[in-house]
Image: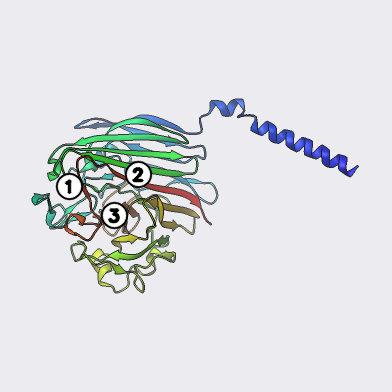
Amino acid sequence: MRTNICLFLFAILSSAFACKNSGPKQDEEQKPTLSIETADFGQTQEGPAKLYTLKNENGMEVVITNYGGIITRLLAPDKDGEFTDVVLGFDNLEDYQKDHPYFGAIIGRYGNRIAKGKFTIDGQEYTLAANNGPNALHGGPTGFHKRLWEAKETEREGYVGLELSRVSEDMEEGYPGNLSATVRYLLNNDNELLIEYEATADEPTIVNLTNHTYFNLKGAGKEDILGHILMVDADYFTPVDSTLIPTGELRPVEGTPFDFNTPTPIGERINAEDEQLTFGLGYDHNFVLDREGPGLELAATVREPTTGRFLEVLTTEPGLQFYSGNFLDGTNIGKYAVQYDYRSGFCLETQHYPDSPNQPDFPSTVLRPGETYASRTVYRFSVKP
Ligand code: GLA
């Protein structure tokens, strides 16, 4: 009798299983699990800007404009399945066209600082605009964050994607050579946002592309980010001078407020007496990532304990700029009329080290004709209560 019941149960279970695997139901078939929608965002000097919304089957959304390649909105779930926008930014194009601290933007041609805006390739010296004290920062006043990119949907198994491309002409913002750049934003059903950067040039030049999204896993700009718990897989960082240019030293993080190998709240040591924290007004430093090979490797994680949101950052890059939003001072009013106060967002910018063109011992950022610059970063969202 017992055997019969078991056989009966087995038959029911296996038929249910077979049914589940015989293909998606009618209504599931009609509803794509990954989608992209387009909307108008307004006019720029270079043409109309659009907003592209990438969605996955879990309800995660990433909205990108082809003006500056800016991520304007990113919905991620918390421990109760509640979706909130976790990136800082504006709700209109005009505010992005004004001066702002690079909210969500693609940064190029050179992310981070170049000392005195000068560098030399093959004996030829080039001069960039000094737009950050004596130094050049983030590709110049009209860098990649202020340009309109050509946009098209891109196909990839398991992803929905947007491909942005533009040609940065010879001597644009002072950089030599015509540079053809492509950036792809790809979203999958594992709540991973993959960003791929590629570039080629027709003359020797330098390139260091990144994305400057400010995250606040409590919700965009809501309170400060000091309670977020950060891990950075780095045994060394690149200390800076008072203008935030690396000295060239790779300094061990051990025993300093820069040791995030064990997950630690951002605010725990941010006000410690430390010359580097004084120079940065907090954290605004490049970490030398522990790497094993050239592929995507985990660089950092951030957990927000009250919402349980968990962010993992993987990259192929050798460095990570951790910036704790020290220059946010309440002057930017963002989406949902939220005022962006001191340290209300943080950036994890995957990159080559700052001022590499003037630091022969840092990994090179020179790109020569015939070579392809290629870099990948993943921002993966999950919950870890
Ligand atoms: C970068 C820099 C910071 C600051 C911000 C923008 O992350 O390292 O010093 O300039 O951009 O405000």
> Residue type at mark 3?
Gly
Question: Residue at the location (33% across, 48% down)?
Answer: 213
Question: Residue at the location (53% across, 51% down)?
Answer: 79
Mark 2 vs 1, N-terminal side: 1
x and y, in percent, of residue 161 in the image = 39, 35
Asked where in the image residue 319 lies, by quadrant, the reply is bottom left
Is 354 in front, or is 292?
292
CA gap, disc 2 and disc 3:
13 Å
Residue picked out by circle 2: 335
Helix, strand or loop at mark 2: helix
Is 58 in front, or is 338?
58
Q: Furthest-right residue in view?
A: 1
> Residue type at mark 2?
Lys
Cβ of mark 3 under 8 A from ligand 1: no
Would you say 88 lies left or right of 136 here?
right
Residue picked out by circle 3: 330
Q: Furthest-left residue in view?
A: 124
Whether residue 261 is visible to the viewer of this picture, yes or no, is: yes
Q: Is residue 66 above or below residue 376?
A: above
